[in-house]
Amino acid sequence: MATATLERSRPRAGGPSGSAWPRRRRRGGWLLLLAPIVAFDVLFFLTPLGKLVASSFTGGAYARVLADPLVTRSLVNTLTIALTSTVVTVVLGYVIALVLWRSGTVMRVILFAVVLLPFWTGILVKNFAWAVLLQDNGLVNDFLQNIGLTDAPIGLLHNRFAVIVGMVHCLLPYAVFPIFSSLTAIDGRLALAARSLGAGEVSVFRRITLPLSTPGISAAGLLVFIISTGFFITPVVMGGPGDMMIANEIDYYARQLTDFSGAAALAVILTVLVSVIAAVYQRVLKAGGHHETL
Amino acid sequence: MTTSVIAPATHQPSTTAARKGAIDLRQVRKTYGDVVAVDQLDLSIQPGEFVTLLGPSGSGKTTTMMMVAGFEEHTSGSVMIDGVPVDSLPPRERNLGVVFQNYALFPHMSARENVEFALRMRKVPKAESRRRADDALDRVGLSGLGGRKPRQLSGGQQQRVALARALVFNPAALLLDEPMAALDKRLREHMQEEIKTLQKSLGISVLFVTHDQDEAMAMSDRIVVMKDGRIVQSGPPEEVYNHPVTDWVASFLGDTNLIPATVISRDGEEAVVDLAGLGTGRVRDRGAQGERYAVSIRPEHLKFRAGPDGENGGAGELTSSTNLGATIRHRITVGGHSLQLRELSSDAGASGHAVGSAVHVGWDADKAQLLVLEG
Ligand SMILES: Nc1ncnc2c1ncn2[C@@H]1O[C@H](COP(=O)(O)OP(=O)(O)OP(=O)(O)O)[C@@H](O)[C@H]1O
Ligand SMILES: [Mg+2]
């Protein structure tokens, strides 16, 4: 292991210092170290995936599922819900990351714990907690009535709003960390320089901080979007009948209809769709000059 | 007069509008908790003057500059720019051009956009700001490179962009914190000359920070030597170099021979001293008071003599000669002191002393300085 690392981390230019190390080492040696992982992946990931893809092509599954109006509906739902929660999550995550970035050590530790909390809590717990808060006689409605803003409970649960609230809560850490790390990568003296050149707080943010944190924003956006397309429990617990996403449809095909090739076809459709969107997204970012990573 | 803020090189500074850029620090003090970073600092920079803060690491140079720029608030005292107290002004209202150690160029903007930044902040119309930025880039010898991003520029070019960016908005003064630290020796010397030329042609005052004494000597109108947050000596380069007030200043500014001295008489201009083992000497005096004294003679001011010649010198033995290229460094033991004598290689042939031979050395009274021994 040690020799393999040294071999790889040695500067490419070689030079006299390079010759101090044993030069010729069988190239295949370190590949052997990968064998367990490769075996594991082939056995437990590639094989089932291959089987899934293969079964999706049996019995006209694609034609069948695409003709199902519920499927098209859930595909549209998936894209709109995922997009909305991504935008909300990234905006909210940016604000949290900014506060984290600007706060002192103690405050930072506390905030980190708060941001990480959703990571340590099961998704069911998080969703039911929100359901308790948002239900008709829940905390939020009670509060709204107490301050006299509303006279009757308003429907906060079992609709799209609730789904997005639940999802954003789960997704936040995935946005906060990439953005936070791109903020901390910004040289603090750039802000000083900008201020000496006449910039106020707003200009420093708009012209320095924000543009230099775009790598974090775009990474967060992609990550959050991909994760959000796969939500399954949240639409069930917090959504209404019209808020089912593609994962719910897969579940329906597999368990209610016991149409496994149909379920497989849906899974493939989702994977392809997300991959295409991710590829286009990255292409667009590149064209927009966002390769300006620090 | 063009609207360009950077005057063409042919303009004499005195013919342009009334010069500005006087900076005054009065009894400025800065503490971080228990650490006193700067203390009792009195410093005045005249319009058009090039003042260098010179001192070892941690002596408070950066802190002083940051207080002038407005990035650090001083604990007490006051800072004035052109006679106006700026203690409560944020950096962006102080109108000072700052060049940071690693330039702090905005990596996502082209060189031109970097230079234009201050103009955009001042709502200068697009066309004019672009023209002024290009003028400024021309001025620092970067015409045609305005479209490049900082990472596509060499270290020297980046520094020029930083200079253009700090000068384009016609600041009252220029503050530079070790701007040359990242450049190699040859480029550093070249940039020293360029910055000096630029400063002279603009007639702008400069507060320059460095811990490199050669750089300070080469560029400054006045050197302010700092130690432990305080000013130990301030004056023109030659004066600080030839007439240091303490042994610490003498050693910090270069090699020197320090000979312990007992004062026999002094009148504030000249002192007669007893130099243990070297007889009596007549040396320059600036009236510095202390417990113990020494005389400082720079190696290049110590000369070989043909024979015994009364005061200010003595007879000894040449113990070593080292050729340093342009100069030769000799070590001579005289009256129990090991002294360093430096002469130009081109002069060496004439004296031609062999190692181990008896020699006479001496110095001119006005090249030896009475100073206070610290610690
Ligand atoms: N933010 C800070 N907090 C605490 N102490 C500080 C801070 N900034 C500077 N100091 C202390 O103040 C003193 C002066 O520091 P300063 O940076 O001004 O030195 P300097 O002369 O610029 O040194 P260098 O040549 O290393 O840049 C040092 O003792 C330093 O440790
Ligand atoms: Mg410093």
Image (cartoon, coloured by chain):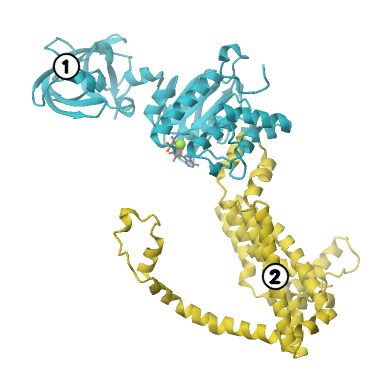
Residue depicted at 61% across the width and 50% down the height: A102
Chain letter for the cyan part: B
**B102 or A286, which is in the foreground?**
A286
Indicate if the residue with disc 1 has its beta carbon within 8 Å of ligand 1.
no
Q: Residue furthest left?
A: B357
Which x, y percent locates residue A228? 70, 69
Residue depicted at 70% across the width and 70% down the height: A274
Which x, y percent locates residue A72? 82, 76
**B147 or A256, which is in the foreground?**
B147
Asked if residue B324 is positioned above or below residue B273 in the image, the reply reads below
**B165 or A275, which is in the foreground?**
A275
Kindly identify the amino acid type of the residue bearing the numbered disc 1.
Ala
Q: Quadrant of the C terminus of chain B?
A: top left
Mark 1 residue crowding within 10 angstroms, few (<14) / some (14–19) / many (20+): few
Mark 2 residue crowding within 10 angstroms, few (<14) / some (14–19) / many (20+): some
Quarter-wise, where is residue B108 in the image?
Answer: top right
Asked if residue A95 is positioned above or below residue B49 in the image, the reply reads below
- In this picture, residue B114 sits left or right of residue A15: right
Q: Quadrant of the N terminus of chain B?
A: top right
The residue that disc 1 covers is B350
Asked if residue B306 is positioned above or below residue A226 in the image, the reply reads above
Residue A274's disc number: 2
- How many numbered marks does the figure carry? 2
**A68 or B288, which is in the foreground?**
A68
Quarter-wise, where is residue B188 in the image?
Answer: top left
Chain A's colour is yellow
Q: SS at mark 2? A: helix
Which x, y percent locates residue B296? 26, 21
Proximity of marks 1 and 2: CB atoms separated by less than 8 Å: no
Which x, y percent locates residue B78? 56, 26
